[in-house]
Image (tube, coloured by chain):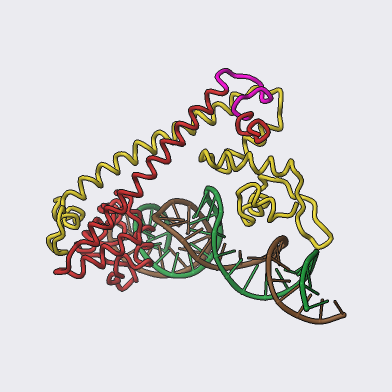
Chain colours: A yellow, B red, C green, D brown
DNA sequence: ATTGACTCTATAGTAACTATAGAGTGTAGG
DNA sequence: CCTACACTCTATAGTTACTATAGAGTCAAT
């Protein structure tokens, strides 16, 4: 199949596929006489693997490492487990940060309940340094 | 004061201040004979305002709009309130997304409780398309 | 006179794409 | 055979909000 069909089947955009190839996440496929990329079904599988990882928020660097690990069967898979654990930790702390942000924004928002004028706006007042000194 | 002192007092880096100037968030200050930027205390206030907004996760574009609104006193401040409401919405949905991600990662992680080999790894298996078809 | 801390501009890099320009390929219809 | 159209190619620039670097200049103190 050509890149357009691979894009549809994988759910990645055509540019993203070419980008992954440039970044070394997928290997360069065969080409037609007219220089078009031709993919086989293992290529679709590999791309789908990457897509699954991306959906879980893994970075391309992490995915690259997973791909390298996949290519060394027999070895223990601790690193895979460790990577997921680490990623869970990152997501957890991001959630905590965002929760704090959310609460702060809520408080800020309540400083200006009704529509006032710019000068009276409780939000702008709160954000301005003079009011907090 | 020169840019280094402004950086220390505001908590922004020197490069960030120059970047904000280039982006039009703060106005270009006066210069010394030696072409060094010189700031006054209103400049520090403006920068602190930007810092406060950034801490709340507002984008530079949003902050730009807030600054423009600040310069039109007397007008109603609905847009300010609306912007904060919108931002709260964005943060909320990001939290929900991350929560889902976190749960998905937890499930994935449990597919491979102990250390096995790469071939047996429940995580890699789960991420590979063949197992899900 | 020179050292050291500071500043200047301009440029490139970060993550993971997306968008565009300008050219070429392939095929279906008339 | 010609042409219209969909698709593909490469190369380049843009996105966000900075950070990092190079190479040059400024300024105060020793």
Residue B123, magenta (yes or no)? yes
Residue placed at 15% from the left, 52% from the top?
A: A113
Residue A34, magenta (yes or no)? no
Residue in the foreground of this view, choosing between C30 and B9: C30
Residue in the foreground of this view, choosing between C2 and A61: A61
Q: Where is A78 relative to B88, above or below?
A: above
Residue placed at 33% from the left, 67% from the top?
A: B36
Residue C9 lies, in percent from the top left, at 43, 70
Left or right side of A125 for A30: right
Q: Where is A51 relative to A86, above or below?
A: below
Magenta region, residue range: B112-124
Left or right side of B42 for B61: right
Residue placed at 34% from the left, 44% from the top?
A: B92
Residue A31 lies, in percent from the top left, at 80, 55
Residue B80 lies, in percent from the top left, at 23, 59
Residue placed at 59% from the left, 23% from the top?
A: A78
Main secondary structure type of the part rendered in magenta? loop
Q: Where is A88 relative to B70, above or below?
A: above
Residue in the foreground of this view, choosing between B82 and A85: B82
Quadrant in the rendering for residue A59:
top right
Left or right side of A114 for B109: right
Residue B47 lies, in percent from the top left, at 26, 59
Callout count: 0
């Amino acid at each position: 199949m050509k890149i357009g069909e691979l894009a549809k089947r994988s759910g990645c955009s055509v540019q993203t596929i070419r980008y992954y190839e440039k970044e070394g996440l997928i290997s360069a496929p065969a080409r037609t006489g007219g220089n078009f990329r031709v993919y086989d079904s293992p290529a679709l599988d590999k791309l789908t693997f990457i897509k699954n990882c991306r959906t879980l928020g893994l970075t391309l660097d992490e995915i690259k490492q997973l791909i390298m690990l996949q290519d060394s069967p027999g070895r223990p898979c601790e690193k895979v487990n460790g990577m997921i654990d680490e990623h869970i930790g990152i997501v957890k702390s991001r959630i905590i940060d965002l929760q704090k942000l959310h609460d702060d924004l809520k408080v800020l928002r309540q400083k200006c309940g009704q529509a006032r004028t710019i000068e009276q706006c409780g939000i702008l007042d709160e954000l301005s340094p003079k009011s907090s000194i």
